[in-house]
Image: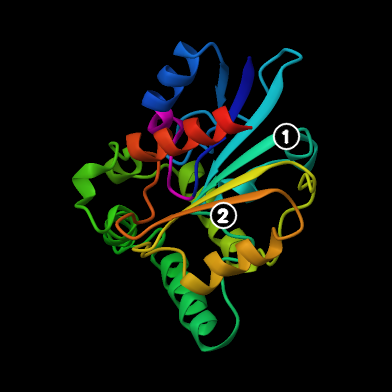
Amino acid sequence: MTQVLAMHGWAGQASAWFHWRQRFEDWGSRWSSADRGYGGGEAVAPAWPPGPERNLLIAHSLGLHLLPAAVLAQADAVVLLGSFSAFVPHGRAGRAVAAALQGMQAALDTDQELTMLERFLDKAASPHARSALPPAPQLQGLTTLGRQRLQQDLELLAHCQALPTGWPEAVPVLVVQGEQDAVVHAASAQQLIDDLRQQPLTLHRDPNWGHALITPPVLSVVQQWLEAL
């Protein structure tokens, strides 16, 4: 039996894992979804389900950096979906990404807030329409607390530069990347691979996928990887 902890990324929510949770529980796994509470609801702190079984961490995008070190260190296997060690790459590309983050921060709590969130979700959904994503409660209007959490995590996106403290250096890792990802720069995606070279690493890259990787085809990739461990 496996204990699963799932962590969404920026502007995400735990409900995005609904179908994955059903499948894993059908396979006999225990599942826990953390939630930052961007939509104004109560935040759910990352915590492993109780039990002595293998701990599997599944993190999407910024989710890797939203985990406490003590929780991250307990992972026995890790799946990273559209993730990164440093979101802002070096050089000219990094300057453009940093400027985009500053623009997103400036839009929060202004009349441009909703437009900014819609544009981000459009990029996250690409190459598909935004309607392919689960409903985003933050598009119905942000609470003060939800806005604060989005702002804090934009700062984290801007400043994360390496694998986070507590990273389990010896465990097997599956990295899933979409070559049409319009959120994570290709240089940042490659840096993650470079940073993981010293441990058991499986890379699955698909030319037709984007940043939104909490999907049935990706779940099949994850299942096959787990069966081979």
Quarter residue 109 falls in = bottom left
Please give left or right for residue 55 compared with residue 13 in the image: right
For label 2, the residue is: 153
**Front-most of 146 and 224?**
224
* Magenta residues (range): 10-17
Rounded to the nearest whole Å, what is the CA distance between mark 1 and mark 2? 23 Å
| Nearer to us in this view, 71 or 106 | 71
Q: Residue at x 38, y 63 (%)?
A: 179
Asked if 61 appears above or below 28 in the picture, the reply is: below
Q: Earlier in the sequence, mark 1 or mark 2?
A: 1
**Mark 2: few/some/many CA within 10 Å (<14, 14-19, 20+):** many
Q: Position of residue 187 (x, y in %)?
A: 53, 74
Question: Residue 219, labelled with which disc?
Answer: none
Residue at the image position 43 percent from the left and 48 percent from the top: 11
Q: Quadrant of the N terminus?
A: top right
Q: Give the quarter of the image for residue 188.
A: bottom right
Outermost residue to the front: 228
Is residue 211 positioned above or below 132 on the image? Answer: below
What numbered label is drawn on residue 75?
A: 1
Q: Nearest the camera: 72 or 210? A: 210
In the image, farthest residue toward the bottom:
92
* Label 1 Cα crowd, 10 Å radius (few <14 / some 14-19 / many 20+): many
Residue 46 visible in the displayed image:
no
Asked whether, in this view, residue 96 is left or right of residue 122, the answer is: right
Name the residue at 32% across, 40% down: 136
Q: Amino acid at mark 2?
A: Asp
- Mark 2: secondary structure: helix
